[in-house]
């Protein structure tokens, strides 16, 4: 990997400045710039920057003191804002009392609860698991808010001291609420900086994240320190959510949560650890946003461009970052199980089973005794088609995240680009043969994204792909040439392949299942190839891979291209399912989060992980039948809860089972297969190893195995790290 591939920071800043100047010239609104209007835009920008700074401060504090980047920071603010509205507006509590209860009691209690129940178990987990779990917490909190406070009447939150009271600035008035926010953000940033750098508990918090055991030997209490960090982060998130709520006419969970995405850019501006730089980045984003709204007009085609400032800044910051160092794997206290590669005929057999299962379920051939699902109707088939389209998109994450370890939150961006390419190639003909070319044309986009992403690793890579997805959904997809506006007819007519028009919903579902099976079989073959082994090698240890002569950077570029080609192909099916795609909502970042969550919960490294989504129509059909039967409100409610909270709860299960549900199901099922004698031998060896070795035998009645010797030595505290001899496993990297 060549460090010279990183462009100098000054060059990036210069190019960004030139680009911003050109955009401003061509999109100038034409109104005169006066001192009054400039002052108003500036104070609005400072106010927005102060709100972003509160969120960014919480992110930096939690990351600096725990090593976990909290994607749920915004969801905590959303929950706090709704709870504040409930106490202050709906129940008539005084604003100070409601603020104290929410920020001073509820928020720190929630932070401590998250730390005790979940976060402490993630201390040794991989970055993928850490990020997935925090995203799952975000989704769960937003679901809880939507269930408790259902959509309906508007829920405005009043300003502190009213909107009309404040400082007269001439052309406008600065409300006391906004002035308080600006001053409070500055005070919090200064206090947190002093707290982390000058106090004993702050030093202990930073020490614990660097070396938990060494900090404990010097008198620190790691569990107390981590709980304090999460309590502080939750309080800052809650305060930010409450203070920004009056700026919206109605509380909408997703709208409030999107604010924290802007704070991600501010935190990255400070390299996730530098608090003053993070606050400076937040203020810069706020000022640019306010002045852009005041002076520029991007027209209807780029109507969301002023909301794309934060993701664009995040992209520029990430591009300017230094190249990640090659990291060697670390030895662990337990042995790593050697993974068995699926044989080609096993993959072919499994794909056949998938197709037969889809045919049987959709046709109503299966009778479960107490419940006969029957043939799928229109509602079940609609759910099945949507689920399979998402499963195809999720399948593209298997080689990228599951094998190569390259975190990607932009699967829908590549899928949307594939839908756009197909729309331009096939038009309204529905010619399905263009799909093959779509995949080839999407691969260069994946390679283009990989060029800056290949220099990164871990969290910055996740933030970079998230910023790319957000920029695509705000700038590219809403353009009228890319995705025509809704209401002009069917954009994506039924596919025509092999002389057959797939206008029947069941036929289209079975077509997608067949494509899914083909992709799965191709991944099985790819995993057994040297390219698949290379991808898994760079996930284990990039330093070792480079030592063996593997071109790490270009290997990442190739895997990104393959993933983009698969996602782009799947995007055609995703668009065809509805026939008419909303250019904004159809490729929303939160939908992409859910896809990543579902695949991660099932098993991000297993090709068949996404197929469990076909059981969604089963639950949907069962719910409809229960509603029709009547007197089963409890079961209907239970199914609704499973549908709403199931994905998030499955991902939280990764805390205990990082490899996903499908992996454990496969381990339990494989011993009953006649040809899997290796699985039966492995289970027997594990059961024997679990038996406590009896010290009294002393090897007289039977010899101790190497595993038992290691277990006894560790129990006696003799060994900390063990590298077993060849033949008994390899150390975890």
Image (spheres, rainbow, N blue to C red):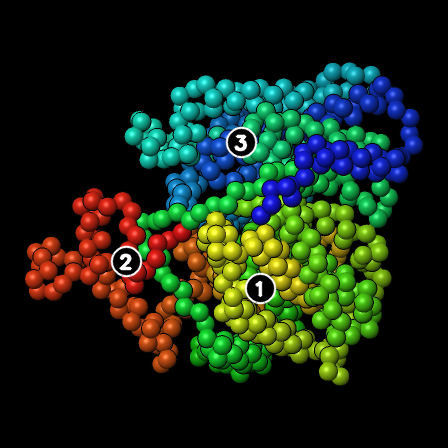
Earlier residue among tags 1 and 3: 3
Residue 120 vs residue 691: left or right? right
How far apart marks 2 and 3 lie (CA) works out to 41 Å
- Residue 505 in view: yes
Q: Which residue is mark 3?
A: 273
- Residue 263 in view: no
Residue 274 vs residue 566: left or right? left
Q: Position of residue 101 (x, y in %)?
A: 50, 29
Q: Which residue is mark 2?
A: 725
Picture quadrant of residue 265: top right
Name which residue lies at 29% across and 47% down. 721
Asked if 438 appears above or below 137 in the picture, the reply is below
| Callout 1–callout 2 Cβ contact below 8 Å | no
Asked if 108 appears above or below 154 in the picture, the reply is above
Residue 689 vs residue 418: left or right? left
SS class of the residue under badge 2? loop
Earlier residue among tags 1 and 2: 1
Q: Position of residue 519 (x, y in %)?
A: 59, 71
Earlier residue among tags 2 and 3: 3
Q: For this rendering, which residue is in front, 134 or 103?
A: 134
Eye-nearest disc, 1 or 2 = 2
| Callout 1–callout 3 Cβ contact below 8 Å | no
- The circle drawn on residue 395 is 1
SS class of the residue under badge 3? loop
SS class of the residue under badge 1? helix
Name which residue lies at 60% across and 45% down. 2
Name which residue lies at 85% across and 31% down. 295
Q: Residues within 10 Å of mark 1 (few under 14, many from 20)?
A: many
| Callout 2–callout 3 Cβ contact below 8 Å | no
Q: Position of residue 305 (x, y in %)?
A: 78, 42
How far apart marks 1 and 2 lie (CA) works out to 37 Å
């Amino acid at each position: 990997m060549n460090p010279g591939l990183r462009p100098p920071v000054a060059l990036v800043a210069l190019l960004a400045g030139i680009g911003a100047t050109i955009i401003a010239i061509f999109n100038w609104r034409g109104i005169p710039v006066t001192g009054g209007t400039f002052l108003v835009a500036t104070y609005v920008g400072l106010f927005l920057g102060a709100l972003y700074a509160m969120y960014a401060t919480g992110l930096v504090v939690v990351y600096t003191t725990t090593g976990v980047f909290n994607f749920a920071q915004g969801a905590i603010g959303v929950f706090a804002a709704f709870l504040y509205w409930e106490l202050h507006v709906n129940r008539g509590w005084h604003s100070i009392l409601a603020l104290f209860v929410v920020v001073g009691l509820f928020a720190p209690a929630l932070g401590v609860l998250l730390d005790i129940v979940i976060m402490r178990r993630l201390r040794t987990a991989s970055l993928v698991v850490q990020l997935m779990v925090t995203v799952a917490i975000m989704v769960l909190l937003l679901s809880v808010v939507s269930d408790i406070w259902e959509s309906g009447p508007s829920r405005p939150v009043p300003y502190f001291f009213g909107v009309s009271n404040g400082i007269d600035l001439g052309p406008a008035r600065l409300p006391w609420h906004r002035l308080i926010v600006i001053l409070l953000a500055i005070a919090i940033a200064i206090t947190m900086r002093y707290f982390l750098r000058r106090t004993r508990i702050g030093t202990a918090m930073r020490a614990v994240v660097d070396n938990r055991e060494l900090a404990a030997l010097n008198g620190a209490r790691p569990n107390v320190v981590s709980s304090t960090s999460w309590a502080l982060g939750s309080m800052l998130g809650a305060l930010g959510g409450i203070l920004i709520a009056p700026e919206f006419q109605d509380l909408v969970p997703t709208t409030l949560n999107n604010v924290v995405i802007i704070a991600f850019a501010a935190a990255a501006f400070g390299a996730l650890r530098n608090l003053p730089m993070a606050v400076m980045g937040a203020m810069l984003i706020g000022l640019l946003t306010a002045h852009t709204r005041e002076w520029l007009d991007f027209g209807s085609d780029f109507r969301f461009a002023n909301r794309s400032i934060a993701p664009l800044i995040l992209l520029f910051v990430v591009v300017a970052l230094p190249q990640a160092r090659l990291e060697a794997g670390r030895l662990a206290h337990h042995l790593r199980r050697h993974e068995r590669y699926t044989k080609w005929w096993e993959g072919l057999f499994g794909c056949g089973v998938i197709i037969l299962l889809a045919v049987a379920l959709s046709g109503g051939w299966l009778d479960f005794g107490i419940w006969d699902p029957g043939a799928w109707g229109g509602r079940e088939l609609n759910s099945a088609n949507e689920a399979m389209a998402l499963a195809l998109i999720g399948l593209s994450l298997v080689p990228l995240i599951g094998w190569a370890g390259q975190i990607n939150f932009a699967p829908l961006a590549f899928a949307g680009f594939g839908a756009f390419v197909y729309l331009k190639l096939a038009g309204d003909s529905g010619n399905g043969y263009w799909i093959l070319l779509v995949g080839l044309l999407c691969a260069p986009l994946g390679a283009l994204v990989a060029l800056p992403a290949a220099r990164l690793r871990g969290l910055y890579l996740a933030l970079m792909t998230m910023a790319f997805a957000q920029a695509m959904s705000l700038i590219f997809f809403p353009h009228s040439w890319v995705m025509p506006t809704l209401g002009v007819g069917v954009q994506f007519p039924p596919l025509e392949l092999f002389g057959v028009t797939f206008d029947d919903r069941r036929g289209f579902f079975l077509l997608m299942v067949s494509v899914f099976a083909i992709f799965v079989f191709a991944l099985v073959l790819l995993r057994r190839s040297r390219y698949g082994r290379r991808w898994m090698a760079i996930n284990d240890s990039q330093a070792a891979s480079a030592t063996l002569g593997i071109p790490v950077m270009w290997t990442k570029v190739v895997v990104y291209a393959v993933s983009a080609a698969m996602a782009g192909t799947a995007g055609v099916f995703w668009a065809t399912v509805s026939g008419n795609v909303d250019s904004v909502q159809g490729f929303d970042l939160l939908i992409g989060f859910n896809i990543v969550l579902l695949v991660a919960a099932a098993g991000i490294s297993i090709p068949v992980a996404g197929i469990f989504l076909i059981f969604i129509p089963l639950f949907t059909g069962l719910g409809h039948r229960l509603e029709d039967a009547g007197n089963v409100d409890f079961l209907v409610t239970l199914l609704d809860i499973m549908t709403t909270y199931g994905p998030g709860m499955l991902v939280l299960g990764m805390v205990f089972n990082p490899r996903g549900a499908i992996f454990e199901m496969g381990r339990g099922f494989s011993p009953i297969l006649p040809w899997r004698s290796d699985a039966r031998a492995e289970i027997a060896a594990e059961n024997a190893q679990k038996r406590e070795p009896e010290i009294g035998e002393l090897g007289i009645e039977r010899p101790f195995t190497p595993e038992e010797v290691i277990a006894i030595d560790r129990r006696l505290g003799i060994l900390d790290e063990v590298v077993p001899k060849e033949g008994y496993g390899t150390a975890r990297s």
